[in-house]
Image (tube, helix red, strand yellow):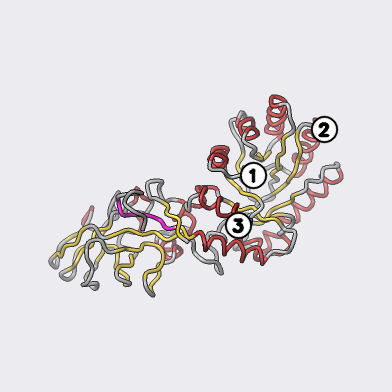
Amino acid sequence: MATSRRFFRPTWAEIRLGALRDNLRRFRRRMPGGVKILFVVKGNGYGHGAAACARAAQRSGGADWLGVSSVEEGVCLREAGIRMPILILGSLYPFESFLAAAEFGLTPTVASLDSARRLVDAAKRLGRRVACHLKVETGMGRIGMSPAAAVGAAEYLVGGGLVECSGVYTHFSCAETDRAFVFAQLRRFRLCLAELARAGVTPRLRHAANSAAALRFPAARLDLVRPGLALYGLYPGFSPVLSLKSKVVFLKTIPKGSVVGYGATFRARRPTRVATIPIGYADGYPRRLSNRSCVLLGGRRCPVIGTVSMDMLMLDATDVPAARVGDDAVLIGRQGRAEIPVGELAAAARAIPYEITTALAARVPRVAVP
């Protein structure tokens, strides 16, 4: 754990940057030579700490691009000293955001003709050429242009001479679950690429694949892939990067029949040793895990008992008689031979693994470890 000069409340997330770099190397080995990697660090690096993860990727040379969801996320990386190309994966609005993106050397997504016009306006104000990537809608139903609209926007951008369409991309909606739908989307995307080529627009980077698509479907790799889950170890075959830890701050023994927590949702069936841990739903530990999850203490699984409150939760530590105030508690990760993977918490909370990690609050310090 970091020294008390870093933080006082003993709840923190450990980020194993060595595991991240190893995942980058492992992922790159799975890709053909020449396929570039865009490391998705949106949502504060899926909760892992975007700046630290981006810095590790930059220093290792393991990724070629970074992906963020907004101008603000990109600016934070620039201010943290990140020099890598950064693609804003979200649709920019208000349109004045294009000017800020260009000023910070961020590559925006153009997902409509209106946004194409605004990007040209920003380039005129700056007095220099800027680059963008076009987003094509092929079946996600979120943002993006139809293939016909994408061709029109590309012709408008290229015709003005101030904007380079350096990339074009789409996004799969069912990469982990529906092979047929992936290939249907890929066919639509390839038809759009052909239409762009006939119009004289040939972006250098064509991309569609996230972690699952890049690993499962070689045909989807194209010029660039956009992994996130795999690099954070949230996909099978890769090493988890994040561990969530705290410490016991209070211990007491309650008699049989006593209740614990808001709503008295737990009633002791035996004399029970209760350990209190200073983490709760304000830290991103889901309230839905009340009476449904475990925490590692002394290398053993201890059930969470009672309702998870804003800042604390309680454990049944009866079977860990040696437990003391100050002992480490592991909510995600390993302790001795025992492990609680993030996928286990996600299943118990009826969530997905990256919902759990991205929900970790800013007040939980991220501590980089080797």
Q: CA distance from mark 3 to mark 2?
A: 39 Å
Q: CA distance from mark 1 to mark 3?
A: 19 Å
Please give the count of numbered marks on the rendered protein.
Answer: 3
The amino acid on which the numbered mark 3 sits, given as a three-letter code, is Ser
- Position above or below: 21 against 143: below
Q: Is residue 221 left or right of residue 335?
A: right
* x then y, percent, for residue 44: 50, 48
Mark 2 or 1: in front is: 1
Of the two numbered discs 1 and 3 on the same chain, state the one appearing first in sequence: 3
The amino acid on which the numbered mark 1 sits, given as a three-letter code, is Leu
Residue at the (75%, 44%) spot, across then down: 147
Where is mark 3, residue-wise? 60
Q: CA distance from mark 2 to mark 1?
A: 23 Å
Residue at the (61%, 53%) spot, across then down: 39
Where is mark 1, residue-wise? 87
Where is mark 2, residue-wise? 159
Q: Which residues are magenta?
A: 9-14
Q: Residue 187 lies in what quarter of the image?
A: bottom right
The amino acid on which the numbered mark 2 sits, given as a three-letter code, is Gly
The residue nearer to you, when weighing 149 against 121, is 121
Residue at the (38%, 50%) spot, across then down: 364
The residue nearer to you, when weighing 346 against 103, is 103
Mark 3 or 2: in front is: 3
Q: Secondary structure at mark 1?
A: strand
Q: Residue 57 lies in what quarter of the image?
A: bottom right
- Position above or below: 334 against 158: below
Mark 1 or 3: in front is: 3
Q: Secondary structure at mark 2?
A: helix
Q: Is residue 332 left or right of residue 183?
A: left
- Position above or below: 102 against 248: above
